[in-house]
Image: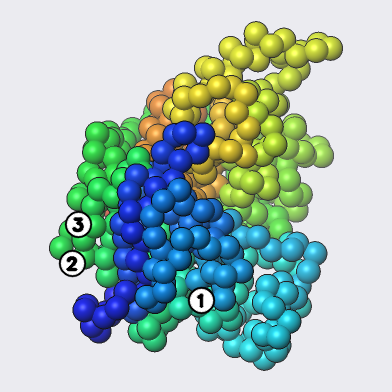
């Protein structure tokens, strides 16, 4: 925990009776919230709860309609981002915002004013403190999602923030990387920094935070020390009518052992992995776990035709996929792929819901012009399947929450009627309600006979959803777990080379 030394100390931040509306619709309704120096405070809530708006007001990105902001005792009616930075308020965003064609060093140095620009040695020290080696001369576009996130954290360190807002920092991190991050945040809190920690991973609240607040529909519905509440209390406050929705997932669904596998990978080697063999039957959800760099995403991209096959075979329903591969050919054969980075590769942000949903099946709904009625019918059916938040089909995907954007990415794949579906980090950075919707959609798809390959850094998710779990390390499948031996502890041990209690695959 952050370790609050003096609970009676002056608060680092007080947000008093904050109201904010958009188009006459209130999104914050009199929220009062505070945090002390040395405290790590979790801020949680579902889509549209108001947590992002509240933090935007604190960082000067938005202006509240009424209310008061006090930072270290100084009162503000409104702030702008420059003023917020000047008084030590810094936001580490969920989606990294780096210049792709600049180096790591240039991205970090240019984020600070010229008179406070850090030296190469200072940047190197800040990056090294986060526990993952990163080449300062590497282009930002070549970093993994986790690497980009760590650079954003390094920016915050070098801004000398007194109040740090961290938005979903572990969504793309492995368990080890998360542990290193938590150690760093605890050290920063021990030095007196006040940290707002936004997360949808509720176990993190108790691993890291001293206190927690739950927002629902713009109202603060729960605020308590983490020592005095539990996961059930947080879930019930956030989504009280859906707390048990995930309990119906049948992890131990029995598949027909005599059924022809939907997907067979035979001694496959590619960029970042080698000699991988696995098979997935219709109706199976096979979890693929491992640390970042283990080769999981490279394997998925090779199966989908993004990367080349260097050796081995891929068979779909008994037929080998030969010749030059491509995503278009993979989709035509019946393979769907929801990628890790939904903004870069999963959806067309500037497109509407209906445009995204039907983008992969234009040949079915158009000859010269798109048949609007057919596009709407297909879109509506798909949106029902993924439980998209109700609203017009003409909504821009850019304006949807992260959870609803991910649902659109899934729907776009389902339009192509795949028989094999690869999901790479499907719940990264989405709230508890959207997570349950996606879990339900995965269950429904498996019951319909789809073969699902689930890649996730969330070992709890892997353990909960998978009928079978494969563990990758160093570009190879090292272990395979079956019920009843699938647990978070077993997956974690196998992923990091510990004693998992099972033999290598």
Horizontal and vertical percent position of residue 280: 50, 38
In the visual, does 78 lie left or right of 417?
A: left
**Up-down relation of residue 500 to residue 232 (above or below):** below
For marks 3 and 2, give the CA distance: 8 Å
Lower position in the chain sequence, tag 2 or tag 1? 1
**Up-down relation of residue 289 to residue 130 (above or below):** above
Residue 343 seen in this snapshot: yes
Q: Quadrant of residue 295?
A: bottom right
Residue 230: give its label.
3
In the visual, does 369 lie left or right of 343?
A: right
SS at mark 2 in the image: helix
Nearest to the observer: residue 262 or residue 49: 49
- Name which residue lies at 39% across and 60% down: 68
- Name which residue lies at 73% across and 45% down: 306
Dot 3 and dot 1 residues touching (CB under 8 Å): no
Q: Which residue is mark 1?
A: 88
């Amino acid at each position: 925990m952050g370790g609050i030394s003096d609970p009676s100390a002056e608060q680092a931040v007080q947000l008093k009776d904050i109201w904010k509306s958009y188009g006459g619709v209130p999104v914050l309704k009199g929220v009062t919230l505070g945090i002390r120096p040395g405290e790590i405070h979790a801020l949680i809530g579902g889509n549209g709860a108001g947590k992002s708006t509240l933090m935007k007001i604190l960082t000067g990105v938005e202006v509240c309609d009424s209310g008061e902001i006090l930072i270290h005792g100084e009162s503000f009616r409104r702030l702008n981002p420059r003023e917020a930075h000047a008084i030590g308020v810094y936001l580490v965003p969920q989606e990294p915002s780096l210049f792709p064609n600049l180096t790591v060093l240039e991205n970090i140095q240019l984020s600070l004013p010229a008179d406070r620009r850090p030296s190469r040695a200072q940047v190197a020290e800040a990056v090294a403190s986060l526990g993952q080696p990163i080449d300062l001369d590497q282009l930002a576009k070549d970093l993994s999602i986790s690497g980009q996130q760590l650079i954003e954290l390094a920016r915050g360190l070098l801004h000398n923030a007194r109040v740090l807002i961290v938005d979903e920092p572990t969504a793309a991190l492995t368990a080890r990387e998360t542990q290193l991050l938590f150690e760093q945040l605890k050290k920063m809190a021990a030095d007196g920094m006040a940290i707002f920690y936004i997360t949808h991973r509720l176990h993190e609240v108790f691993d890291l935070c001293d206190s927690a607040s739950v927002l629902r529909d713009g109202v603060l519905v729960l605020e308590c020390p983490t020592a005095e509440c539990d996961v059930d209390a947080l879930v019930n406050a956030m989504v009280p009518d859906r707390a048990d929705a995930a309990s119906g997932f049948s992890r131990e669904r029995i598949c027909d052992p005599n059924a022809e596998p939907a997907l067979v990978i035979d001694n496959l080697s590619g960029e970042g992995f080698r000699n991988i063999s696995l098979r997935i039957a219709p109706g199976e959800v096979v979890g693929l776990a491992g640390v970042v760099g283990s080769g999981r995403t490279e394997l998925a991209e090779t199966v989908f035709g993004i990367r080349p096959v260097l050796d081995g075979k891929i068979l779909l329903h008994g037929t080998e996929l030969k010749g030059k591969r491509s995503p278009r050919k993979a989709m035509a054969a019946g393979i769907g792929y929801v990628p890790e980075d939904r903004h870069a590769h999963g959806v067309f942000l500037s497109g509407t819901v209906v445009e995204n949903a039907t983008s992969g099946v234009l040949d079915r709904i158009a000859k010269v012009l798109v048949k609007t009625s057919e596009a709407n019918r297909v879109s509506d059916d798909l949106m029902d399947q993924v439980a998209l938040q109700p609203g017009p089909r003409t909504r821009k995907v850019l304006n949807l929450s992260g959870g609803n954007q991910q649902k659109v990415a899934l729907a776009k794949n389902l339009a192509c009627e795949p028989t094999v579906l690869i999901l790479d980090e499907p719940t990264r950075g989405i709230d508890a309600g959207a997570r349950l919707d996606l879990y339900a959609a995965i269950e429904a798809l498996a019951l319909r006979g789809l073969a699902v390959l689930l890649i996730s850094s969330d070992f709890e998710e892997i353990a909960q959803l998978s009928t079978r779990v494969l563990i990758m390390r160093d570009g190879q499948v090292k272990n395979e777990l079956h019920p009843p031996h699938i647990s978070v502890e077993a997956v974690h041990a196998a992923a990091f080379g510990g004693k998992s209690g099972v033999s290598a695959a």
